[in-house]
Image (cartoon, rainbow, N blue to C red):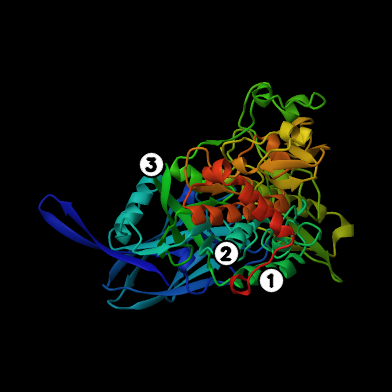
Amino acid sequence: MRYLLSILVLMCCTITVAAQDLLVEAESFDNPGGWVVDPQFVEQMGSPYLMAHGIGKKVKNASTEVTFEKGGQYHIWVRTMNWAPGEWDAPGRFNLKVGDLAFDKTLGLRSGWGWEYVGKTKIGKKESVALELIDLTGFNGRCDAIYFSTSQKEPPSSPKKLAEWRKTITAEPNAPKEENTYDLVVVGGGLAGCAAAIAGAEQGLKVALIHDRPLLGGNASSEIRVHTLGIYGHFERILKKIDTEHYPNGSAEAELDQVKRDNNVKSYDNIDLFLNWRAYDAKAEDNTIKYVDARQTATGERKRFTAPYFVDSTGDGWIGYWTGAEFSYGRESVDTYGEAWEEHGELWSPKEADNAVMGSSVLWGSKKTETPQQFPKVPWAKPVAKEHEAINGEWYWEFTRNDLNQIDDAEEIRDHMLRAIFGSFSNAKQNPENDNVALEWVSYLVGKRESRRLVGDHIFTFNDAKEGTRFPDAVVIETREVDVHYQTVLTDEKNPDFISKALFYKTPEYYIPYRSLYSKNINNLFMAGRNFSCSHAGLGGPRVMRTTGQMGAAVGFAAALCKKYDVNPRDIYKGYLDEYLDLIEEQKYPKIPESKQ
C-alpha cells in the first residue's frame, strides 16, 4: 500500500524541533473491505477517497498496515466530511482503529471537507500498525486521508494550501518519472473513447486508453447502467463490440455487456489499457499538446503520456481545458444560433444566455423478497425527498440547478441525488404494500449529460439536426429525435427538484461533420463524446452513446490518416477528405488484417 513519510523541520527562534509525519491516503488501503474508491471529484477536493456505500447496511471494515520509522507520541487527524449536515445524526459516521486502540471519536461530523482530530497514541520505532475504518451507518461515510504527527499541528484545509502541503509532505517531484510514447492517446473509456481506441488500433496505431474506473463504458458501464441509444452509422461492427442491449436503465444485465466490452477492447494487442488511471494534467506548447499526466487512483503512481495526437473523451473536456482549448458551458441566447422552439420558449432556449445545462442522474433499483425488509430512518434525506415516494429510479431522476456547475459542484449534485433516493425509498417503505421490497442497488457514480463543450471548426446546432444539413465532411449519422431536459420544478414548485422532463423534437436523418470533432485552436486535439463541438440544444440528440461512439470511431480513423501524412486533424478536412471519407465508407464492409485484430 502507499503511505507517505517525511520529516519536517520546524524552526522556532534558535530551537529546532523535529516532527515525524506520516500521511496515509485512504484510497491506498490494502483491503478496502466494503468501502469503495471514489475518484470522481479529485479536481475539486484534492484526492480520491474511500466511501462506505452500503445503501443503508454497514459495510465491512477497510484495513491496511503501516510501519513507523520512528517512535513517539502521535497525534492523529482524519480528513472527512459530513455530506448532509443538519439537525440530525450525520449519515456518514465512522470510527478509526489504530492497532488495538479503537478510538471512540465519531468521525464524519464536519460540514465540508476538512480535518477532524481523533486523538493520540504511542507508537514504537519500526513498529507496524494496523489501521481500520469502521462504518457506523452504511450511508456513504467518507475518508480521504489519515495523518499522524508528533507535532500537534493540524494540516491545512483550504484546497490550495492543502495541495501545496501534500506535495511537500510527499516530496513529490514536479514530473512523473515514467514517460510513455504512443501514436494516439485517448483519455476517457466511455463508448466514444473505446471506439476511438479500436478504430485507431485497427489502422495500426499504438494506442493508450486511459480510464479512471476499473470498468470500461462510462455511462453504459455496469457501475452506472444506462443502456445505449442511437444508430450505428458506418461503424456497426465496432460499436457492437462495446454497446449494450436495450435492457431497462439500472438493470444488472449491464454486467453481461460489461464482460463483452472489456474483453473486446483488451483483445487488441496495440491498445495499452490503463484502468483506474485518472488524467490530472496536460500541457500544450504553441497550441500543440505535448503530454498528458495521469495518476493511478489507488497507489498514486504517476505516468506521463506523449503522442502526436490526443483524443479528449473525458465528457468534461478536461484535456482541452488544461491545454487552453476554447470551450463553452451553459445555454446560448436564443438569438445566437436561432434555435427557438416557440412552443416551449425559455424551457428550450432562453432570451439571455445562462449557465443552465442538462443534469446528472444516479440510477437505482429495488427487488421484491419473500420476507419483510427493514430500512433505516433517514431524516437527513427528507429535506430533499420531502413527500416523494418511489422504489425504483429511471433516467428522469436527474438534478441540475443554475447556481451549480456540473463539474465544480458534482459531489454536491451526486449527494443531492443520494438524499433524493434514500428519502423517496424510505417514504415508500411506509406503505405496507412495500413491506417486502428491499433496496437492491444504488450507483454512487454521477451519470452526466452535459458540461463543457469544446469548440471545433464547426459548432453543431439544433438547426443542423432539424434541417438535416448534409455536410461535405459528414462522418456521423443519426435518426434519433433531439431531446432537451428541464427540471419539472421550474413549471410547478410542488414537484421534486430532482425529477426532469424531456422535450422531444422529431427530426429527419441528420449528420455531424468531422469539423466538430477536432479543436479549433489546439492543433493535435480530437474530441469525441458529449464534449464535442456543439451548442446546448445541438447536444440534445447526439449525446446518446451509440452516436458518441460513432464520433470516437471517426476520430480514430482520422488519427491514422494524420499519422500517415504527418499532418494535424484540420489538414484531413482541407487536403485528405476524400480518402478519409472512403476509409469510413469502407467500414460498412471492412477487410481487417488478422494482425490488427
Q: Residue at x 86, y 59 (%)?
A: 434
Q: In which quarter of the image is residue 401?
A: top right
Q: Left or right: 229 with respect to 162?
A: right
Q: Which of 511 and 486 is in front in this view?
A: 511
Q: Nearer the viewer, residue 391 or 525?
A: 525
Q: Do the residues labelled 1 and 2 touch (CB within 8 Å)?
A: no
Query: Does 355 sit above or below residue 381?
Result: above
Mark 3, secondary structure of its residue: loop
User: Which label number is shown at residue 218?
Assistant: none
Q: Nearer the viewer, residue 364 or 266?
A: 266
Q: Left or right: 428 with respect to 120?
A: right
Query: Does 490 sit above or below residue 69?
Result: above
Residue 432 visible in the snapshot: yes
Q: Quadrant of residue 248?
A: bottom right
Residue 480 place in picture, x, y as percent: 80, 45
Q: Left or right: 49 with respect to 4?
A: right
User: Which label number is shown at residue 201?
Assistant: 2
Q: Which of marks 1 and 2 is in front?
A: 2
User: Which label number is shown at residue 286?
Assistant: 3
Q: Which of 257 and 265 is in front in this view?
A: 265
Residue tagged by mark 1?
259
Residue 490 place in picture, x, y as percent: 74, 31
> Dot 2, crowdedness within 10 Å: few (<14), some or many (≥20)?
many
